[in-house]
Amino acid sequence: MVTTKASVGSKVDTDVLICGAGIAGLALAADLERRGVDYRLVERASSPREGGTAIGFWTNAWRCLENLGVAGKLRKSYWEGERLRIGTAMKGRELTSFDLGECDGGPHEFRYLLRSDLLRQLLQIVPKQRVMYKKGLEGFGEDEVSGGILAEFSDGRRMTCKALVGADGVGSTVHKLLFPGEKAANYAGYQAIRGVAKLPQGAKTSPYFTFERGVINQVWGAGVRLGTFRMSETNLYWFVTYNGPQSGGESDDGAALLAKARSVLDGWDESWGVSTILAATPPTDVLRTSIGDRWPKPQGNWGRGSVTLLGDAAHPMTPNLGQGGAAGMEDALVLGEKLAATFKGGNPGPGEVSQALRTFEKERGRRVSYLTLKSFVFGFLLQLPFAPVTFVRDNLALPLVFKPRSFLAHTKFDPPLAPKPTRTTQPKKKAGIFSF
């Protein structure tokens, strides 16, 4: 932690300072807005995030979106998943398939949606005067007068708060400052290329291929996987994962990534429509990420004092369960409830704020540890590179692991009760620190 101290006055500029306007940060801001807690949201980028491709959300994520009041608008634009199909790469053979309605704990819900659409919906809840762009956090420490946190930004400005929340992603600056030398994430041994194909109206192909509405497709090879889902009439999301060293020196240009995807899927049975998908994907709608995670302790403890972390900044996980974004929103709703209860009295001391943050971390620690470990194990099994081993996986292990009964057990989450809007005050202002 940076040991910056300065006497800037007895009052803080805001109660809660959120660093990072991604899914988790915006979800927390939206929750605090309706709970009447004073906050600011700062983002290093110069404008709202428009990048990324799509993200898959299961039942727990949709429960969070319902809680925040944005689920209905998003559902109107994206098709729902109804069935899971798993197949093999070389023979185009279906290994198993089942309806989501066969899974215990329903009703279940699954959709892919564009990340940019999700962020825009959340931003509509957050007043513009509470969001500041081009504000890269450089350091923080204790404010000697208020006992709160003094944050310093790349433009030389400072801001004081009672609670600092790092929601700034896998490469979190807040995490680096809290735990110098600790890795942002541990590489899992494989890369992912993701894209969104643009389809003509009414596009159809062979019975095996997955332009079919409502079907979540996973195709397994040796050290390579393909996943597809038709998001809407004209958008089809796809991903390719492949084993290899961590990306370094390779081009992330869209055309180069499409060529890489073609090469790793070379020889796959065309009944899965690989060439059709890649040919229909604009190079501007493709990206690559190195897959990794960082296993949190079951008891949480990913913060210190009046500082905590949220979402990928606290517990990056591999995408094999489709739970990274969902876990970040779960974090946001639980933390929002804790902060609202803490600030309800008006002026909590540093000890009260710290206790609330540790309670949040402990409450979330066990669940996100379970999700991170389960996702890692799934990825390890699904990225096995040896044909004899994959034969055992596909024909013997598959029936044991992918049972409909327990397949979606990890998506159970009961969010805190949604509060009635209580915002009655304007953001705090403090001369000489920030001008909002």
Image (spheres, rainbow, N blue to C red):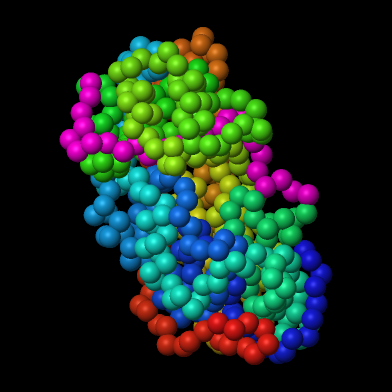
Residue in view at x 37 percent, y 79 percent: 421
Q: Is residue 218 magenta?
A: no
Between 58 and 408, the residue placed more toward the observer is 58
Left or right side of 121 for 427: right
Q: Is residue 434 above or below residue 381?
A: below
- The residue depicted at 36 percent of the width and 15 percent of the height is 269
Residue occupying the far left of the picture = 202
Quarter of the image where the N terminus is located: bottom right
Residue at 43% of width from left, 72% of height from top? 126
Q: Position of residue 326 (x, y in %)?
A: 45, 52
The answer to whether residue 410 of the structure is visible from this angle is no
> Is 219 situated left or right of 231 in this image?
right
Residue shown at 48% from the left, 26% from the top: 259
Which stretch appears magenta? 181-206
- Residue 53 vertical position relative to residue 193 in the rendered view, above or below: below
From this view, report whether residue 107 is shown above or below residue 86. Answer: below
Q: Can residue 285 be seen in this snapshot?
A: yes
| x, y percent for residue 309 | 61, 60
